[in-house]
Amino acid sequence: MMRHMSSGRVLLAVLGLGVLMPLVSQAQEEQKVSVQVEVVLASKKGSEVDPPELAKMKEQFQKQNFNFTSFKRLSNDKLDVTAKQATEVKLPNGSNASLQLVGMKDGTATVRVAIPRQPTLDVELGRQGAVYQKAGKHVGGELILVLSPPSK
């Protein structure tokens, strides 16, 4: 059974993580949103934070009482997400996450995030911040999908 939720509060309640908001851009002929998509392995093994920019993520997780001590970026891609077809993100645990634009209104995009064995969620993405989405287990830790504004 797939559940579709559009409230940022619901995402926060389901995940207990993060702030909602990556960058939105719109093409004339077709609506799309550009999103920086990172796959991060969070674990309780060691204290490595690689790259150092993930220290902010570690701090946010600690504020939410998630006890991960190590954060390692496994991939980092800028993707254009459209309504016509889901954009696939290959995860290192062998599964794929998919992102699909549901709609845009007043500079805010609603994107459907589907990850195997996780609830399908509709998240609202604005112009700043990041969304953290649990993406499954991997080598003794948890994969976290991080959606944020594209790097300049």
Image (tube, rainbow, N blue to C red):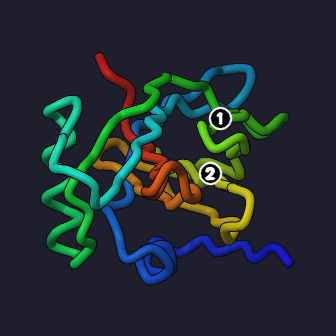
Upstream in sequence: badge 2 or badge 1: 1
Tag count in the figure? Answer: 2
Residue 57 pos. (x, y %):
22, 51
Does residue 100 appear in the picture of this structure? no
With 69 as the anchor, is 16 left or right in this view?
Answer: right
With 55 as the anchor, is 88 left or right in this view?
Answer: right
Element under disc 2? strand
Q: Amino acid at mark 1?
A: Val
Q: Which residue is mark 2?
A: 111
- Residue 54 appears in which quarter of the rendering? top left
Could you give the CA–CA distance between mark 2 and mark 1, rounded to whole angstroms?
14 Å
Residue ID at (64%, 75%): 5
Element under disc 1? strand
**Quick one: label 2, few (<14), some, or many (20+) residues within 10 Å?**
many
Q: Amino acid at mark 2?
A: Val
- Residue 72 appears in which quarter of the rendering? top left
Q: Quadrant of the C terminus?
A: top left
Q: Which is more toward the observer, 17 or 70?
A: 70
Q: Which residue is mark 1?
A: 89
Q: Which is more toward the observer, 120 or 100?
A: 120
Residue 139 pos. (x, y %):
50, 49
| Mark whose residue sits in front, 2 or 1 | 1
With 45 as the anchor, is 132 left or right in this view?
Answer: right
